[in-house]
Image (spheres, rainbow, N blue to C red):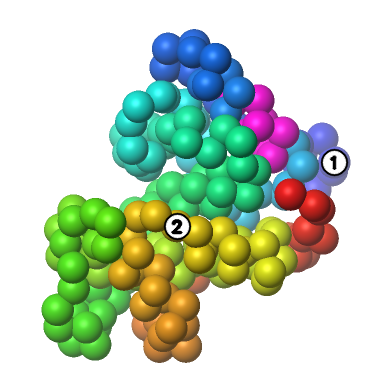
Amino acid sequence: MRYGDLLQAAVVIVTLAHGTPREEATKARLEQLLASYDLRDYTFTRRVVIEEAVMNHAFPTLTLNVGFADSSDELLSSYVHEQIHWHLREHRFQQDAAVAELRRLYPRVPVGLPEGAESPYSTYGHLVTCYLEMIADRRLMGDERAAAVIKNKRHYTWIYGVVVRDEAKIAGVVARHGLAVPVTSPPARPSPP
């Protein structure tokens, strides 16, 4: 693939919901991250909206709030997290099988923030999403910065705790159900935050 083709393959269009200063700052930081990191392996939708006063969400359009306008690592991790939801949507049957296995491994899970997601299914599904996010963060930022980002999460606290504590177990579930993000690019050489 030619260099120009590589650039075109990674184009992401970032728009603002309201044009507030915090939205502008978040957009500028995200565009800097998109230019600085090779995110082709972690880009499954090319439309991103920055919107103040909403929770990050993947569907119908990937939407990021302004909470990490001042933190490149946390914004990058949030972007990757929401993109991974798009990856898993393309693997719905495998995701459902992974959730069934996770229900057997963890019969009781929290529902609702800050520990869990909005439903039992979403909490189980986020064990996969957050594990894949952590692996991507390590690849993009390096182990130390990725660990700091995961440790500082203020939402899905039980989920991230399990992902860190039981990493090998979650990795096995992801592998058995073919949910890993196919990685074709070389690992990043992390730049300073």
Choose between 190 and 175: the one closer to the eye. 190
188 shown above or below 78: below
Point out which mark residue 98 bears.
none
Q: Report the number of numbered marks.
A: 2
139 to the left or right of 62: right
Give the foreground label among 2 and 1: 2
Amino acid, disc 2 = Lys
145 shown above or below 52: below
Q: Is residue 179 visible?
A: no
173 shown above or below 120: below
Can you identify the residue that label 1 sits on? 3
Q: Main secondary structure of the magenta part?
A: helix
16 to the left or right of 89: right
Question: Which element is circle 1 on?
Answer: helix
Choose between 101 and 28: the one closer to the eye. 28
96 to the left or right of 177: left
Can you identify the residue that label 2 sits on? 153
Measured as percent of width and height from the top left, residue 190 is found at 78, 58
The magenta-colored residue range is: 27-34
Measured as percent of width and height from the top left, residue 76 is found at 59, 47
Please tell me whether residue 147 belongs to the stretch shown in magenta: no
Please tell me whether residue 28 belongs to the stretch shown in magenta: yes
